[in-house]
Image (cartoon, grey):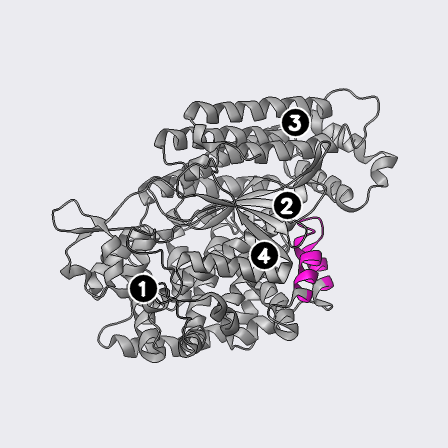
Amino acid sequence: MLHDYTTTTPESVSAVVAGAIATGDALIATVGGPAPTRTWDNTLAPLDRLGAVMVRAYGEGPFMGRAHPDRAVRASAQAGEETLSKWQSDLVFRRDLYEAIEAYAATAEAAGLTGERSRLLEFVRRDFRRAGHGLSEADRDEVQRLRTRLVELEVAFAKNIDEFQDGLDLTREQLAGLPDDTIARLGPGEVSGTFRVSLDYPDYYPFMDYAHDRELRRALQFKFFNKAVVENRPLLEEALQLRHRIAGLFGEPSWANYAMELKMAKVPAAVEKLYAGIVPGLTAKAHEELVDMAAALGDGSLQPWDHRYLHTKIRKERFGVDPAAVAVYFPLDRVLEGMFAITGEVFGLEYRRLDHIQAWHPDVVAYDILEAGSERQLATFYMDLFPREGKFGHAAAFDLQSAHAAPEGYVLPITAILANFTKPTETAPSLLRHDEVTTLFHEFGHVLHNSLGHTELTRFSGYNTEWDFVEAPSQIMEHWCWNADVLRRFARHHETRDPIPDALVEQLVAARDLHIALAMLRQVSFGKLDMAFHGPGATKDLDAITRETSEITGFPLHEGTFYPASFGHLFGYDAGYYGYLWAKVFGDDMFSRFEAEGVLSPKVGADYLAKVLRPGGSRDPMDMLRDFLGREPNQQAFLRLLGITAS
């Protein structure tokens, strides 16, 4: 049964958190208490059940900090997230739990573990080692203190970004270049007769794409790049210092070295090797793209606030592709129908929309995922797709209930997508730009990964994989958004219902790689900034790093700005942002099988489901890739699609 979110109050959120901790304390007492013999059932099984309790509690309580319309509920949820995170992070510092796990590891039963259970023992022992068991008591206490403070910083950093409000109040004349439907959706400014262009994505990106006034583009980007800078820069600086201190206590030269033990890449050198193989070719291609943009600009030097505007202008002139004109063929309802039809065909699924759900906002919809032909339910997911004040400002998937085997039966996963697409009105539907279509497919890739995984243990359910692999199954979904045959199946004009013209599809696909090297270098820039922030050295010149890595993009730094203060990936994906590009390499490689055997092949889809999605995090990603591809993974598909050659 789904949770009733309509009764959510600040007090109910606090009660959810308190209840989860009480249940957790009881489970932990089983592990930490005396036992004549250490077994799976009294040692590791309670720890894994604890994981399920915590995820469910997050979904009913702290998750509301990202989505609930009531500010008081959000505040309670954010406080609850901090409480829950602190309680969980404290567990690995408990000596009694460490000793119980080590005692179990020495038993014959533990030596005979296989599959998920063996992997869980390995991972849990690693968790406790990384918490400082093996260090002196003083150093272990210091690690615990520092990690507790990092949790506080992460919650505050995200809250400041989500709740930050700013923008420009502009006259109709100052909006020259923006499509009429975009202007119609803008809220009123404080001054009578003006329009408010906020920093929310549905306002910011169209303005940067279309606004003719170069100075206003600069002004809005200045605000966007300085979002929450006063509040968040000190938090970021403190977090970087604390992470470096933790790494040093474990004898590691940097947080990047310490953090990457948990990832596919294992060491920073592997990431540098990835960049070394693609950056020279990208840079050469990007130089040609910059010449192209400079010619379109005419007078003056290229600045970062010109990038999106010139890209949109050239795209429209050269390929006849205007994002607003393309969007009329992507009404949200049709895109959802198409996405469900495609994934249903490839993976053997059906979707059933749920009526009368008790969600946290009227905009929210929910679906069950069923096995085609059998009506067997596999999962449930929510979709909350439109912006509102105080809501999470990006697009992401959230795990509200993890799949796992339980004494009462198998527990099915529940996932939620939060996004910020243009909301429909009484007279106009929600029309998605093509990049928003790819965003929706991308996030739905996470939903499917989380929904279709079938593991015994919570620890490995769904997308609980190595962090630099978790984006691969969502990257692969984006490819369908660029396939002409696939697009024609669901892209229809929102008024006439005419299918998207073949010529427009061809132009859209042809335009895909326009300025692609610059786009990829932007990803490299973010990844290198993240790695440099977390590299060797106790103190770092963050402004110099930001400037140096920004210049990788081919554009100068926007002077007077510090975008890392609102770069949420620096918490959670710390020393891991490279994973988007890393995962794209593997996502492209996996999609090459679909290209070779049928872009919507149910046979390949069934293989992909069985060998990549269903195992969740229960196997090493490289082993799953080898099984699915039938060979060693490589960069060839990635390079081919980008039109570059490795150096």
Q: CA distance from mark 3 to mark 4?
A: 30 Å
What is the three-letter code of the residue carrying label 2?
Gln
Q: Callout 1 environment at 10 Å: few (<14), some (14 to 19), or many (20+)? A: some
Q: Secondary structure at mark 4?
A: helix
What is the three-letter code of the residue carrying label 3?
Arg
Residue 413 visible to the viewer: yes
Q: CA distance from mark 4 to mark 2?
A: 42 Å
Pinpoint residue 633: horizontal percent, then vertical percent: 67, 67
Q: Is residue 343 magenta?
A: no
Give the quadrant of the N terminus. top right
What is the three-letter code of the residue carrying label 1?
Pro
Segment tinted magenta in the rendering = 603-627
Q: Is residue 15 left or right of residue 268?
A: left
Q: Secondary structure at mark 1?
A: helix
Q: Which mark is in front, 1 or 4? A: 1
Marking on residue 94: 3
Q: Secondary structure at mark 2?
A: strand
Name the residue at 81% across, 28% down.
38
Mark 4 highlights which residue? 268
Write down the quadrant of residue 73 in the picture.
top left
Mark 1 highlights which residue? 304
